[in-house]
Image (cartoon, rainbow, N blue to C red):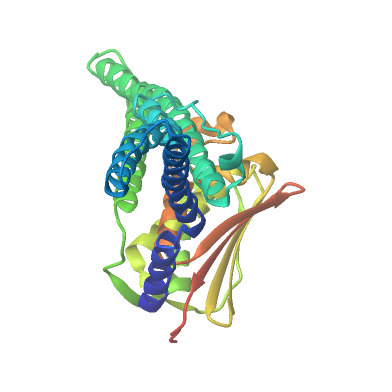
Amino acid sequence: MKDYLKKGQLNIKLKERSPRFSLTVLFAGASFAILLAALIIVGAAALILVNTGVISIGEGGLIGLMVLVIIVFGIAFSFIFGRLFMKPINTIINMMNRLARGEYRSRIAFNGALAKNQTVCEMTNSINKMAEELENTEMLRSDFINNFSHEFKTPIVSIAGFAKLLKTDDISPEQRREYLDIIEEESRRLAEMATNVLNLTRVENQTILTDISTFNLSEQIRMCVLILENKWSEKKLDLQLGFDEYFVTGSEELLRQVWLNLLDNAIKFTPFGGTVSVRIGREKDRIIIRVRNTGSTVEEKDRERIFRKFYQCDTSHSTQGNGVGLAVVKRIVDLHSGSVRVDSENDLTEFTVVLPQPKLEK
């Protein structure tokens, strides 16, 4: 597992350090062209003036004059052409300044020869992609703040209201128990929302795994199913857990969050009396976990966005979540050098988690 993590980090560093040779040649060639143009123009002008008798000067004086004129014209040409070559750099700097001010709709584009240069195109695409991601994240963040503030305020108001009613003396024991049940349920909702946000913040700031161990994955998933028993039994779901015993090497605590989030998500979107199934298999040096539920379909346009934080493709279930559970899943799986994807069609949705296990032990 550690070798996989190191190998992934090495590939990223090599990609970041790849030489931008074409861009180097472009700017070096431009600088040489400026210098060469200055030498040719100044030298030709000086020789013409001498040959036509406009100026008469000794050999040593001619060389000195040419050097002086070359310096003057060289500075002038460098300034003029330098402004031209600084223009794309200024464009990039201005773009960055706009992004820093929060103008995430800004985009950058070059014309002419620069637009055809592979390195410049790569840089332009990267900057525009960054701006697009910042724009999407800002929109999701704004929506999340609005939704989360509303969702966070609703149970607080509910708890306060029913707590006030409990102070009155003219309520029956049945009403008192009902109000206490509501307070308990709303308190649980608050705790889940706070836990999800804290989990997301924690895994986003984590770059390496420090608590790696080998444990029984099958038993861990069965325990997660038991933890969620109240939710799936209330909807009378058919839980199908057809798998043998499998052991994995990774962070037991973090992977537990993956199965809880995937199972909770499957239960949430499965209609009354539906089916939720979990399958585990092994292919060479990989463990593959599939969590499937019936009765729901994720649109194709949402399948990539679904793992973004704060994104909710089905707002009708927004009161049951806050759009961070699958973002937590994606980040934890990435930390384990694995992958997660969603396949959905014909009222069937399946999440597939692949975990590399080069040294699997039983």
Residue found at the far right of this picture: 346
> Up-down: is 171 above or below 134?
above
Q: Quadrant of residue 163?
A: top left
Along the line of sight, which residue is nearer the eye, 224 or 18?
Answer: 18
- Residue 77 position, x and y percent, is 40, 35
Taking 272 as reference, is 15 left or right?
left
| Residue at screen point 34% across, 67% down | 251
Quarter of the picture containing the N terminus is bottom left
Whether residue 147 is visible here, answered yes or no, is yes
Along the line of sight, which residue is nearer the eye, 303 or 238?
Answer: 303
Quarter of the picture containing the C terminus is bottom left
Q: Quadrant of residue 213?
A: bottom left
- Residue 79 position, x and y percent, is 36, 33
- Residue 306 position, x and y percent, is 55, 43
Whether residue 227 is visible here, answered yes or no, is no
- Residue 67 position, x and y percent, is 30, 44
Along the line of sight, which residue is nearer the eye, 31 or 346?
Answer: 31
> Up-down: is 354 above or below 201?
below
| Residue at screen point 45% across, 26% down | 143
> Up-down: is 86 above or below 241?
above
Taking 134 as reference, is 354 left or right?
right
Taking 254 as reference, is 315 left or right?
right
Along the line of sight, which residue is nearer the eye, 72 or 87?
Answer: 72
Tag count: 0
